């Protein structure tokens, strides 16, 4: 079979991809996740007397915890299948990636299975997040020291 014939056959067999529908689902699910994040933020501000400057870390931790719980119960996978990037891009996707690797390798034991594989998927996110934060802070320090930006 010639490559042209194969491509024609593939076009006939492969169903069309609904790009607009997928983008809208991802947009709305991501928006709902962010709305829940804002509700958590206001919960901490109202009931625990956090300020807008100090509420970020507990909010992020709570959202990651929620996604880990949903992953453990098998619900986040269904959300990911429905919304794709809408569930993977927010910080909840990070929690899902960490816990998914741990669940997948739990039969290998605590140390070699969970401990050795828990950051398999999320390790690159952590590595490049820390590295980019370092370089951004270094650039800011240089700009502050030469007087371009105020601290």
Image: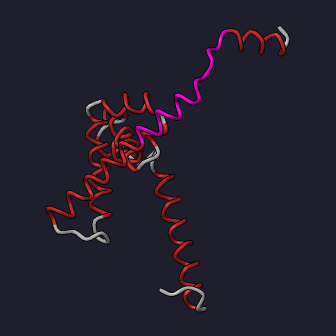
Magenta region, main secondary structure: helix
Tell me which residue sits at (58%, 24%) in the image: 18
Residue 85 rendering spot, x and y as whole percentages: 49, 39
Tell me which residue sits at (30%, 30%) in the image: 74
What colour scheme has been applied to the protein in the rendered image? secondary structure
Front-lying residue, 50 or 58: 50
Q: Please state if 91 lies on the left or on the right of 49 as rendered.
A: right
- Examine the structure image and report whether residue 95 is included in the region drawn in magenta: no
Tell me which residue sits at (37%, 28%) in the image: 78
Q: Please state if 81 lies on the left or on the right of 149 as rendered.
A: left
The quarter of the picture where the N terminus appears is top right
- Examine the structure image and report whether residue 18 is included in the region drawn in magenta: yes
Residue 52, quarter of picture: bottom left
Q: Residue furthest left?
A: 47
Tell me which residue sits at (20%, 61%) in the image: 44
Relative to 1, say whether 95 is above or below.
below
Relative to 58, say whether 107 is above or below.
above
Relative to 122, say whether 84 is above or below.
above
Residue 134 rendering spot, x and y as whole percentages: 52, 71
Which residues, given as a range, are shown in magenta?
13-30
Front-lying residue, 40 or 113: 40
Front-lying residue, 97 or 41: 41
Front-lying residue, 151 or 96: 151
Residue 69 rendering spot, x and y as whole percentages: 25, 40
How many marks do you count on the picture?
A: 0
């Amino acid at each position: 079979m010639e490559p042209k014939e194969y491509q024609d056959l593939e076009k006939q067999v492969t169903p069309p991809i609904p790009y607009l529908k997928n983008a809208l689902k991802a947009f709305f699910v991501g928006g709902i996740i962010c709305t829940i994040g804002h509700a958590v933020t206001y919960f901490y501000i109202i009931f625990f007397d956090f300020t807008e400057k100090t509420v970020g870390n507990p909010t992020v931790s709570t959202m990651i915890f929620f996604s880990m719980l949903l992953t453990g119960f098998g619900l986040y996978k269904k959300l990911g299948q429905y919304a794709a990037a809408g569930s993977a891009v927010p910080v909840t996707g990070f929690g899902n990636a960490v816990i998914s690797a741990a669940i997948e390798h739990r039969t290998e034991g605590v140390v070699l299975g969970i401990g050795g594989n828990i950051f398999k998927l999320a390790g690159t996110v952590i590595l490049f997040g820390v590295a980019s934060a370092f370089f951004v802070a270094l650039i800011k320090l240089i700009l502050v020291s030469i007087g371009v930006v105020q601290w």
